[in-house]
Image: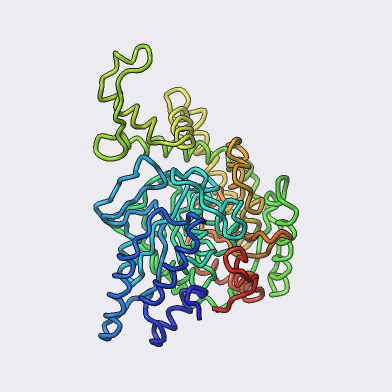
């Protein structure tokens, strides 16, 4: 039996029953990682450290010691999360040698739960992008079609689960970076409410938008991983002290009320017809389950992308100012004056300039410049402050919609996975990949993507469900209604499997 073709919930049952050891499980995944190296999913993978963690759990289990809820289960980690004394590059040359002196809170929680930290996954540099093509370490391939992108920025984490290189992984979502890669890789991706999960130790991109969340094959696993990572953390002042519901225990109880809103603006121009067909099909599944479907409007959503591309770069220009090569980060060797007038610049400043020029890639530089401009004196009122007002209006739109319905559904990504290079020359086309996901980050609400179909060419399609702040429990239960009625979550890519079959959990 192949241990890597299951879910975390499935693995836990076997581990508990004693039919497998964690060492056997991680050995299976390590073998598979070797076989599928060409996908470029992991930036770092240390087999010895992984085996050590697994053996430690096996020893504890044998001794009858108390074990956490993820004991012995591998979890792949987006390389944006700090792991003590392990390389954490954020997909950037700037942090090529960075080893954080501490664990992110989610990492501490995973360790406490007995999870096995299974490698660091590839990503767009500093989480800026929608295709993982902006990584300094080369792109990750989509397991469903290796000529295509796995989405981004958490492309490595999404591909890891899609290709069964780990049953679970963590990503971060600032404008869609969990939900969009989940959609195009045919798996579940959940962005929690802003404040639900501690951001301590998450390398900051846009601090008012960033959230950490799970990638999984199904909702039972998503509930399990969310349960482990949620909660107020004194080290993150924006984490919220809200009770954590029993996501796992309540998952199979259908929601009391199933009023679903279809966002009119999410079915407009630019939506791929095959994606639209699958979403309409999903709506019928909900109708059959007794849902009431109602069209609602988010009138300001058309300003989501422009508002996001002011707020996120503004915050990024401030957050990334710390990479000046003095304390850590890439340092240029040659920073002698090169251009006219540079001889008047202090050598320390020249060193910072040269180091930043070498250490950051093109997209990161573009964002820093956009953000610096948007915040500059004289322009802040026209750009940044204006964007904040739009952000409030977008939030108000959601509040109004959630007065009428319990959740909103629509497409996660306007198109299935696109080919490498297709959007790299046109930043605007790339930015539009997140047209349906960005507004949830601006409003701070939770959202998830669940597999809901395949194109004729065999590419996955994702259904997005959005819920009010801190309504993750209802979000999961609502999504479960769809999962129970369909088998899309059981499909696996044939490019890595040789079969196009379904695998049970
Ligand atoms: N694609 C969006 C961006 O480039 C979102 C990225 C993210 O969520 N981290 O900013």
Q: Is residue 2 above or below residue 179?
A: below
Residue 186 horizontal/vertical position (percent): 60, 62
**Residue lying at 41% horizontally and 86% vertically, measured from the top left:** 19
* Residue 66 figure quarter: bottom left
Tell me: residue 472, above or below residue 505.
above
Measuring 70% from the left and 74% from the top, which residue is drawn there? 290
- Percent across and percent down for residue 398 are 58, 53
Tell me: 375 left or right of 457.
Answer: left
- Looking at the image, is 373 positioned above or below residue 218? above
Q: Tell me the quadrant of the picture where the C terminus can be found.
A: bottom right
Horizontal and vertical percent for residue 175? 52, 48
| Viewer-proximal residue among 58 and 299 | 58
Which quadrant of the structure image shows residue 483?
A: bottom right
* Tag count: 0
Q: What is the basis of the colouring in this image?
A: rainbow
Residue in the picture at 44% in, 60% down:
170
Q: Where is residue 267 drawn, in percent x and y?
A: 71, 51
Q: Residue at x 26, y 19 (%)?
A: 346
Q: Which residue ends up furthest to the front in the rendered image? A: 35
Residue 367: in sight, yes or no? yes
Q: Is residue 257 something one can see in this rendering?
A: no
Judge left or right: residue 358 versus residue 473.
left
């Amino acid at each position: 039996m192949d241990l890597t073709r299951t879910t975390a919930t499935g693995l836990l049952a076997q581990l508990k029953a004693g039919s497998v050891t964690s060492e056997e499980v991680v050995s299976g995944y390590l073998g598979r990682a070797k076989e599928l190296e060409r996908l470029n999913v992991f930036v770092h993978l240390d087999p010895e450290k992984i085996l050590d963690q697994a053996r430690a759990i096996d020893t504890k289990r044998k001794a009858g010691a108390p074990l956490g809820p993820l004991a012995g289960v591998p979890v792949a980690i987006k390389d944006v999360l700090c792991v003590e004394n392990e390389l954490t590059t954020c997909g950037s040359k700037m942090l090529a040698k960075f080893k954080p002196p501490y664990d992110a809170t989610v990492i501490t929680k995973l360790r406490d739960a007995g999870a096995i930290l299974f490698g660091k996954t590839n990503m767009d540099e500093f989480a800026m992008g929608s295709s993982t093509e902006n990584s300094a370490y080369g792109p990750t391939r989509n397991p469903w079609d290796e000529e295509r992108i796995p989405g981004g920025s958490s492309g490595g984490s999404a591909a890891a689960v899609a290709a069964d290189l780990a049953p679970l992984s963590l990503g971060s979502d600032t404008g869609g970076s969990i939900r969009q890669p989940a959609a195009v890789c045919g798996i579940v991706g959940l962005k929690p409410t802003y404040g639900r999960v501690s951001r301590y130790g998450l390398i900051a991109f846009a601090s008012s938008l960033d959230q950490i969340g799970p990638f999984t094959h199904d909702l039972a696993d998503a509930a399990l991983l969310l349960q482990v990572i949620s909660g107020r953390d004194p080290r993150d002042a924006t984490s919220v002290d809200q009770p954590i519901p029993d996501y796992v225990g309540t998952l199979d109880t259908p929601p009391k009320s199933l009023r679903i809103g279809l966002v009119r603006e999410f079915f407009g121009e630019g939506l791929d017809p095959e994606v639209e067909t699958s979403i309409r099909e999903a709506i019928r599944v909900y109708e059959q389950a007794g849902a009431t479907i109602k069209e609602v409007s988010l009138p300001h959503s058309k300003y989501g992308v422009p508002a996001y591309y002011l707020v996120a770069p503004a915050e990024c220009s401030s957050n990334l100012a710390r990479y000046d090569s003095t304390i850590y980060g890439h340092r240029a060797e040659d920073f002698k004056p090169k251009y006219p007038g540079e001889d008047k610049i202090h050598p320390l400043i020249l060193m910072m300039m040269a180091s930043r020029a070498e250490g950051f890639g093109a997209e990161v530089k573009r964002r820093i410049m956009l953000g610096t401009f948007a915040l500059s004196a004289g322009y802040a009122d026209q750009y940044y402050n204006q964007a904040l007002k739009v952000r409030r209006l977008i939030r108000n739109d959601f509040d109004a919609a959630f007065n009428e319905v319990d959740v909103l559904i629509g497409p996660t990504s306007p198109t299935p996975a696109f080919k490498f290079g297709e959007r790299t020359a046109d930043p605007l086309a790339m930015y539009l990949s997140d047209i349906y996901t960005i507004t949830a980050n601006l409003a701070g609400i939770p959202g998830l993507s669940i597999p809901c179909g395949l194109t004729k060419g065999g590419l996955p399609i994702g259904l997005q469900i959005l819920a009010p702040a801190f309504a993750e429990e209802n979000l999961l239960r609502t999504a479960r209604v769809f999962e129970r009625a369909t088998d899309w979550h059981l499909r696996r890519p044939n490019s890595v499997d040789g079969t196009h079959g379904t695998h049970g959990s």
